[in-house]
Image (cartoon, rainbow, N blue to C red):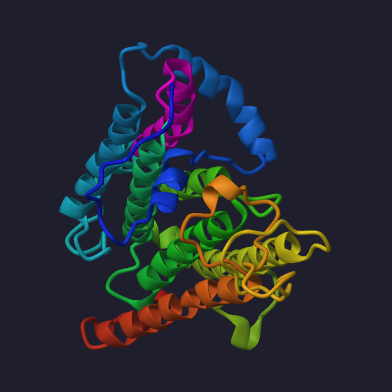
Amino acid sequence: MGELKFPTKVNTKVSTRGLVSISKHKYIGGEYTRLDLWMTPFWNWAAGCLPLWLHPNAVTLLGTLGLVVGHCVWWFFSPNFDSYADSPPPYWVYLVSTFSMFWSQTMDAIDGKQARRTGASSPLGQLFDHGCDAFSVTLMAQMLASALDLGPTWMPGHFFCASAVMFWMSTVVEYHTGTLPTNDGSLGVTEAQFVVMGHQIVTMVWGPSFWRRDLLALLPFPVGLLGGVVTPLNISLLVTTGQMIKFLVVMTLRIREAYDTDNPPSGSPCDCKTPPAAEGEAKSPTPTLEETMWGHKTLGFGRALFHLSWVGWMTALMFLWTEAVRGLDGDVGRVW
């Protein structure tokens, strides 16, 4: 093919080294969960049904647009995440929402397979796919908030924050290690998507009030102060919080493990603790990140902690949401 050449007039913020890194970038996905492995035969079949002329970026876009359709349906019936505004939405809203999520999940799983089938894999394709994923997790969180009839309270912000935090942490891990994890070893994106779909189906069958049922009221003895606390909704909030914290810990440990090596390679700007072998020599990056992917990255565990600290900003935004909606709905306490 010959030597890769670049135009002389380029954005001065991107050096030749950076452009070479972009051209040689390759996507490395994380390990599959058990559910991913169960779904793989279906995804392989679905990918085989696609025509070879269909570009993988078009597959990604079709999946995102399908989710947009489901979101718009919910937006029409529940603009404030409150399906009780006038009357509960018809059952088909939940079906459309669930199908749109399943459609989006399937397209997201097979766009990479289509790229490999057609030989159209590219850094731009990953960037486009990752951007659509970032957009989609927000849509799914909003659709979940509407299905649960959360209203303009702090709880939609909680789900938005959880989805954004876990997405951000995966991106930080890829930045420093070159591998994009989609799970924490046991639970991941696929499981979360099916849980959200399950919430839609449960709400369709039993109604939004199901999530506020007092489970302890089923016991044959009084529960005192715990009455009304143990509800399906509060359990969902608690599990979401726990999973978010677990994901943060696991991703931090993965980055720590990547930098914890006695014989790392050298040649990339890095603020990690390993000292340079000689004056003027660049410090050593994580050994799991190939040299062709260093680009302009400033690597090191300290830098990774700084990137992960943005989780705090996301959490702060959630609390700002909480304060902003306090005066919008006088019935905020009803969800408890």
- The residue sitting at 54% across, 42% down in the picture is 190
> Is residue 252 shown above or below 202?
below
> Is residue 16 shown above or below 98?
below
Q: Which residue lies most toward the right here?
A: 262
Q: Is 108 or 148 nearer to us in this picture?
A: 108
* Percent x, y of residue 173: 58, 59
Q: Is residue 89 left or right of residue 239?
A: left
Image quadrant containing the N terminus: top left
- The residue sitting at 55% across, 54% down in the picture is 174
- The residue sitting at 38% across, 15% down in the picture is 50
Determine if residue 201 is in view.
no
Q: Is residue 39 left or right of residue 259?
A: left
Determine the main secondary structure of the stretch shown in magenta: helix
Determine if residue 187 is in view.
yes
> Is residue 14 shown above or below 200?
below
- The residue sitting at 32% across, 80% down in the picture is 321
Indicate yes or no whether the magenta region holds residue 116.
yes
Question: Residue 67's quadrant in the figure?
Answer: top left
Q: Is 113 or 6 nearer to us in this picture?
A: 6
Indicate yes or no whether the magenta region holds residue 160.
no
Query: Magenta residues?
Result: 99-121
* Percent x, y of residue 312: 48, 80
Q: Which residue lies most toward the front here?
A: 279
* Percent x, y of residue 266: 68, 59
* Percent x, y of residue 45: 51, 15
Image quadrant containing the C terminus: bottom left
Q: Is 70 or 246 nearer to us in this picture?
A: 246
